[in-house]
Image (tube, grey):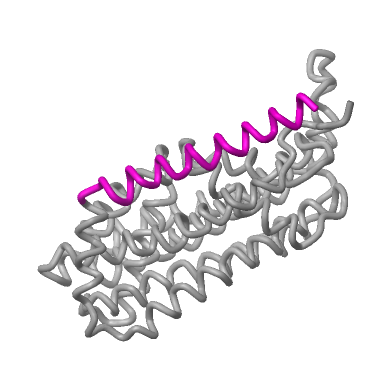
Amino acid sequence: MQNKYINFLIKLGVLIFLFVILYKQLFLNQSFKNAIQHFKISTDGNVYLIYSVIILMIINWSVETIKWKFLIDKIHFISWLDALEGILFGITFSMFTPSRVGEFGGRVFALNSDRIQAIVSTILGSATQLVANISLGAIGFLSYLLVIEKFEKYTLSIVFFLALFLVLLLHICLFNLDIIATKFPKVKQLENIRKYIDIISLYSNIDLLKIELLSVVRYIIYNVQFILLMYYFNIEISILYAVIISMTIFLFQTINPLNIALIDFGFRGNVALFFLMPFTDNSLNILAATIFLWFVNLIIPAIFGGISALRFKFISEEQ
């Protein structure tokens, strides 16, 4: 009975904390207010672009649900509803942590099995997404230097080989993670965590390739969303430049070491301003597109994630 009360208090605390923080960020933040005001006056934009962005958000997190369920099913079966609720609460929980590391812990509250094992699988999925983001972002950045900045061939060659080395290194590490599991040093002090590291060996290279392909789909969706918002907010740019700059912006947003979801739209906005200002003299258009993307992809799912937490048992209620 006591654990039921504790669970109730945790759920209540999550909702209160979430809505207090959201209130401060959405209603007391001047940048967000400016973006909303600008959105209201942009009624001449194609409203179907906004509908498309929202639909793509649903597809985006649905793909992530598929990916996470695929990972967790290797440990034990999880229903689609539990997977979706885990994804949503992971977004909620990640909003208060640097680099969104809370996403790992947040998702596993949807499970009633060994949650540490699930965290390992979740980290593997996030690592694969990071590899995909950086690899494709590197292509975008190289295209930016070649097509837009028109770097000289010597400098571009150096950047190319550095990027190629990084991408290859990331993939070599990703597709050889099983070595960590099978050849992990048999140190007595590490025996307690060996069973969690062994989780990695459950995933073959084919499995990892499938996860990376799903990560690529999510990457494409995110960039398409941002490009659609560029056009909605009247940022006049060719489709080629829009794709290249979107990929470049996403690269620098991805490698931001202090990526705290509730406050990093300031950083996101500054990165977008740096790369898009040569194409428009209206910085508010850029900030509005960036903040709206942040709101659709993180804030809306986080609200549903907070609600979904009402079904979770954060601690066991069994006596």
Whether residue 95 can be seen here: yes
Query: Which residue is at 72% across, 64% downward?
Result: 210
Residue 131 vs residue 160, the one in the foreground: 131
Q: Would residue 106 be found to the left or right of residue 94 on screen?
A: right
Q: Nearer the viewer, residue 186 or 315?
A: 315
**Left or right: 150 as drawn, with respect to 132:** left
Outermost residue on the left side: it is 281
The residue at 34%/64% (across/down) is 292
Compared with 17, 307 (above or below) is below
Q: Residue at x 52, y 52 (%)?
A: 302
Residue 133 at what x, y percent from top left? 51, 57
Q: Nearer the viewer, residue 232 or 169?
A: 232
Q: Quadrant of the N terminus?
A: top right
| Residue depicted at x 32% and y 43% | 24
Residue 129 vs residue 143: left or right?
A: right
How many numbered marks, from 0 up? 0
Where residue 191 appears, as percent x and y from the top left, is: 84, 20
135 part of magenta stretch: no
Q: Quadrant of residue 274?
A: bottom left
Q: Is residue 10 magenta?
A: yes
Residue range in magenta is 1-30
Q: In the picture shown, does residue 77 fall above or below 239?
A: above
Q: Position of residue 90 (x, y in %)?
A: 60, 47
Task: Please identify the quarter of the rendering in which residue 119 is found.
Answer: top right
| 150 shown above or below 315 | below
Rendered location of residue 46, percent (x, y)? 31, 86
Name the magenta segment's main secondary structure.
Answer: helix
Question: Which image quarter holds the C terminus?
Answer: top right
Q: Can I make out residue 173 in this image?
A: no
Q: Is residue 280 above or below residue 205?
A: below
